Image (cartoon, rainbow, N blue to C red):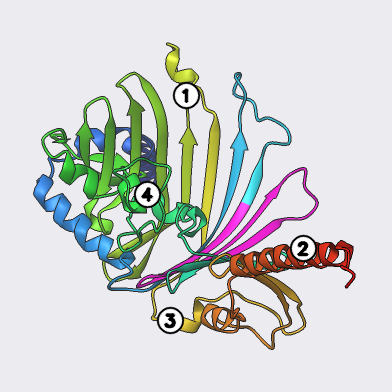
Amino acid sequence: MWRGSSHRLMTVLALAVWYVATLGGMLCATAGTNLEHSLDGPTLDVDGLLQGLRSTAKHFDPRVSTFYIQCREECEVFDETGRPIPGQAYWNEVEYARKKDMVFCHFRVKQQSDSKPEEEWDVWRDRVTAQRREGSIQIFPNLLPQCWNRSTYTDRLFMDCYQDLEFTSPPDFGPDVKRPSDGNILKLPGIVEENFAKYKLRPRLEAIDGFPCHVLEWPGIDIIWLDAAHGFLARKRQFSFNSKHLVTIWLNQNLEEFAPGFWLPKTQVTESYTSPHDRLKDGPPKLRRRYVTRLLKADFTPKEDDFFKIPVASDERMLVGDMVRQVTYWRRPKGTDALRNVIRDIPTRTQSPKWSYLLLINGLIIGLILIVMLARGLRKPVSKP
């Protein structure tokens, strides 16, 4: 009797375990699709989200902090049918650092068809830009675009890292653009503050990668999914053109906490859907480019000023062209020199080249006049007594 009862009990228990496991699997399988519908309403209003965004932006404000970012980006280019175009893919690696009014950028890029990557250093310091390419250094009296438009990682975080940078010569972006920040229209929280009445907060949280996000929306133009629990990071953003054509989708994934409440994505995915030519057409958006950016290193510890320099090996002979003083010379440095030393070692001229040319021309004219006068004196007949 006990054997029969025990057998029936084991059968019932086995069926119960199977039922619970099956039900649990079904719930897990549908959790991702139903999570968005089970989320509650937002816990913060727009003002609260703006306050959180301002707090996060301080980590990338060079006036109050120092930061160093190293990342690698791979890009695929697609044709009209959505297939990758052979030979158009490329990769680049960027080191970018900011401290006060100083900028350091080291950039390497390689096309698939190239045999050797191109490499460049750009440093903005002491109100001049020093740029190194291969065996030469050029010194410019103005802020070059390479000092700010290659920080794509922070741009896709929608952080403004250029508050203190100003153009030292008239830029090509219009009279109202006096600094790189003026051209960064997608920066947060700036675009929301400037268009506060146009942005609306959706009535429910929405899940991105399984995490609840507040959704700010400028209807037909801009949608931002903000994760308040992870440093108010924009986990996803979608931007459209004139409410008709999807332009770009940004995704920030695989977050890592670098400081209490300060999170950064280890992976960024950017999809560009339309070109200016496509925007004139109707129809579904077409994927044109996909960028995948991977964070290699992020450092927010203070750095010495000597970090912001053009690296030069002790055995390199470098051609230096100074556009500030209009001189070019060969230099064999000892060790790696800071930009400040490169400028200080430039020889100065006692006279401007323009004045030297004028003196030479005047000397030639006076010499010709003397020769003519002498020739006429020799040809004049001598009167007899």
Q: Mark 2 touching mark 4, by CB under 8 A?
A: no
Residues packed near mark 1 inside 10 Å, few (<14), some (14 to 19) or many (20 plus): few
Q: Which residue is mark 4?
A: 6
For the question of whether residue 27 can be seen, the reply is no
Of badges 1 and 2, nearer the viewer stands 2
204 vs 361, nearest the viewer:
361
- Badge 3 amino acid: Lys
Q: Which residue is mark 3?
A: 303
Q: Which residue is mark 2?
A: 368
- Badge 1 amino acid: Pro
Quick check: 27 left or right of 70? left
Of badges 3 and 4, nearer the viewer stands 3
Q: Which residue is mark 1?
A: 276
Q: Mark 4 touching mark 1, by CB under 8 A?
A: no
Q: Residue placed at 73% from the left, 32% from the top? A: 86
Q: Residue placed at 27% from the left, 40% from the top? A: 224
Badge 3 marks a residue whose secondary structure is loop
